[in-house]
Image: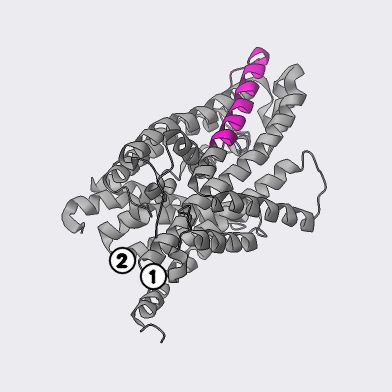
Amino acid sequence: MRLRRTLTTLPLVFILYFNVSGGPFTIESLVAQVGPGLGLLILLAIPIVWSLPETLIVAELASMLPEEGGYYRWVHRAFGPFWAFQNGWWTWVYSLVDMAIYPVLFNQYLAFFVPGLGVVGRWGVSLAMIWGATAINLRGASPVGRTSVVSGLFVMAGFLALVLAALPHAHHAPWSPWLAPGKTPLGALGVGLSIALWNYIGWDNASTVQGEVIDPSRTYPRALAIALPLVTLGYLVSAMAAAAASDWSTWHEGGWPDIARAAAGAFGRPLAVWLALAGMVSALALFNALLLAYSRIPLAMAGDGLLPRPLAATDARGTPTNAVLVSAVFYSLFALVSLRSCSSSARSSRCAAGSPPCAGPTASRSGSAA
Amino acid sequence: MTALAAVPALALVVIVVLSLRDPEYGAPAVVGALLAAALGPPAYGLARLRRRAPPEP
């Protein structure tokens, strides 16, 4: 295994951005289901009680153990090879369903321009998206980083434009009403937490590429410190401005173009086009950045002899070609699975796999570290 | 520190309980995740056996 260190802070910030968020897409679903008041409160509270502690833990581990394989290596060091294998296995399993979501999201926003695409057409588009991202990944970590920067700026600029266009049309407090009609506070909290956690997890994902980051002990924590506020503000500011200028009860999943038309006055139509394009760009960039992160797990496991050795092979650019290609083949098969079933199962297994890395520092400090 | 490390596990329990309340997608997702996790130890056993096997001539 021969790797090349090419990633600097800015590309890593946007790789993290697309490993966690990808923009405020799905936030519209959160607000629609629980109501704007509780939705905004959850979007403000989760980064404080969940993401901030998680990023601090991940930053410390990334700084102490800046190795390719990231959290798989941390679990190995803290708990030994059995639990490291379990962590790698769970990651691989949830990545199958997680990665099936993004082609569905891509098709959801493509329908703005090409409505009524059939099942075969949608699967063809999904395959084109998956293998487009795979082609970028095969060129190495640096092109993935550059693609993430350009995509991230395009998505954020679209939502910034929406916020600026919506503010003059704000006609009520964005947190009103507090709760969606017919919802109990506990039931709404349950649904809201479930969606919001989904939008705020994954800060350790990109740790798997630390062997390809320049000065990783400093760069990863620095990138986390920039990416967390970027993600949080992206959710909060977009949702607040849009909720103040439109009727939240008409919001629906994949509905940002419609929200733009309702909230942005004369700019509504061009912004709807921009946000539909941004949805497609975001889905592609999410898949691209996550393929980079997930493919390094079979690479690390194969390096330990727990998966076939060819998966640990790297090309002249330092890209684990076989690990990327094998991952893309499996993701192509799972692209047939529907969005909602994917997100439910991905959330369950993602959290299960996320627990051991978070317990890692405790185990390491209690003397179990090698 | 142990309490802090328990927070993700607590969140996992909360999410599993919430998921079980959704019979259409949540409960099958939890069952699927548990089945996949249960396959981990046998997969580890297989991986160890394969690693111990002598290389082909």
- Give residue A299's quadrant in the image: bottom left
Question: Residue at horizontal 74%, vertical 42%?
Answer: A110
Q: Quadrant of the C terminus of chain A?
A: bottom left
A40 or A111: nearer the viewer: A111
Answer with left or right where residue A163 lies relative to residue B18.
right
Q: Quadrant of the N terminus of chain A?
A: bottom left
Residue A155 in view here: yes
The residue sitting at the front extreme is: A316
Q: Look at the magenta stretch and give its main secondary structure.
A: helix
Which label was assigned to residue A81? 2
Question: Residue at horizontal 33%, vertical 80%?
Answer: B52
Mark 2 belongs to which amino acid? Pro
> What range is drawn magenta here?
A149-177
Q: Is residue A327 magenta?
A: no
The subunit carrying tag 2 is A
Where in the figure is residue A23, as x and y percent of width and height? Answer: 57, 35
In primary-sequence order, the first of circles 2 and 1 is 2
Residue B27 in view here: no
Q: Please name the residue that numbered disc 1 is placed on.
A: A306
